[in-house]
Image (spheres, helix red, strand yellow):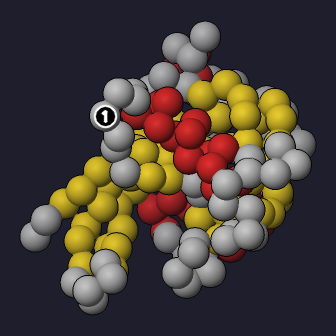
């Protein structure tokens, strides 16, 4: 089986109990996910995660240099075949959401508290990663500056 790597941003608003998470819908199925994409030459994984967060949800902020973990899922390609993807997740402290962004007409964006985000995600691995996410003590976040 072919396995591919993707990089994702975990957009959040605050280092507190009031933290909210930004979810977006996938283009194909409308499922709630986080911004993610394929590697691109010339971009580090954390830079790619930040770029996807902007393109898919209009988000700008500080992205950790190291992932907080990863999750796997099966991606169905246009020809109907499937590949396993492993997604490295980079926390992103959101500082601004643009009024307009490239994929604005293709996706819905939703800001919710962590518990609701975990319920909306249908990927158990991602939901588990989100549930365990502690931005205040994340080693990945400490390396972000």
Badge 1: residue crowd in 10 Å (few <14, some 14–19, many ≥20): few
Residue nearest the observer in this picture, 23 or 51: 51
Q: Which residue is mark 1?
A: 41
Give above or below for 3 relative to 42.
Answer: below
Is residue 124 left or right of 56 when viewed as pictured? left
Q: Residue furthest top?
A: 145
Whole-percent x, y for residue 50 in the image: 58, 36
Whole-percent x, y for residue 105 in the image: 74, 69
Q: Is residue 118 visible?
A: no
Q: Give the residue drawn at x 66%, y 44%.
A: 54
Q: How many marks?
A: 1
Say which quadrant the N terminus sits in.
Answer: bottom left
Q: Is residue 97 visible?
A: yes
Residue nearest the observer in this picture, 75 or 123: 75
Q: Give the residue drawn at x 57%, y 17%.
A: 144
Is residue 18 left or right of 122 when viewed as pictured? right
Q: Residue furthest left?
A: 1
Give above or below for 59 relative to 130.
Answer: above
Give above or below for 138 relative to 124.
Answer: above
Q: Give the residue drawn at x 61%, y 10%.
A: 145
Give above or below for 102 relative to 13.
Answer: below
Secondary element under disc 1, as helix, strand or loop, is loop
Residue nearest the observer in this picture, 1 or 52: 52
Whole-percent x, y for residue 33 in the image: 59, 65
Q: Give the residue drawn at x 52%, y 81%.
A: 28
Whole-percent x, y for residue 83 in the image: 23, 71
């Amino acid at each position: 089986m072919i396995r591919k790597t993707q990089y994702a941003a975990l957009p959040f608003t605050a280092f507190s109990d009031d933290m909210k998470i930004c979810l977006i819908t996938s283009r194909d199925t409308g499922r709630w996910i986080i911004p993610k994409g394929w590697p691109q030459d010339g971009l580090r994984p954390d830079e790619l995660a930040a770029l996807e967060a902007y393109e898919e949800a209009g988000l700008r902020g500080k992205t950790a240099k190291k992932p907080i973990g990863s999750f796997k899922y099966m991606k169905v390609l246009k020809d109907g075949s499937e590949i396993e993807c492993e997604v490295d997740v980079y926390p992103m402290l959101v500082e601004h959401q643009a009024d307009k962004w490239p994929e604005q007409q293709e996706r819905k964006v939703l800001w919710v508290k962590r518990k609701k985000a975990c319920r909306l995600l249908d990927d158990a691995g991602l939901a588990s990663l989100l549930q365990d996410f502690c931005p205040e003590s994340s080693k990945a976040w400490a390396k972000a500056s």
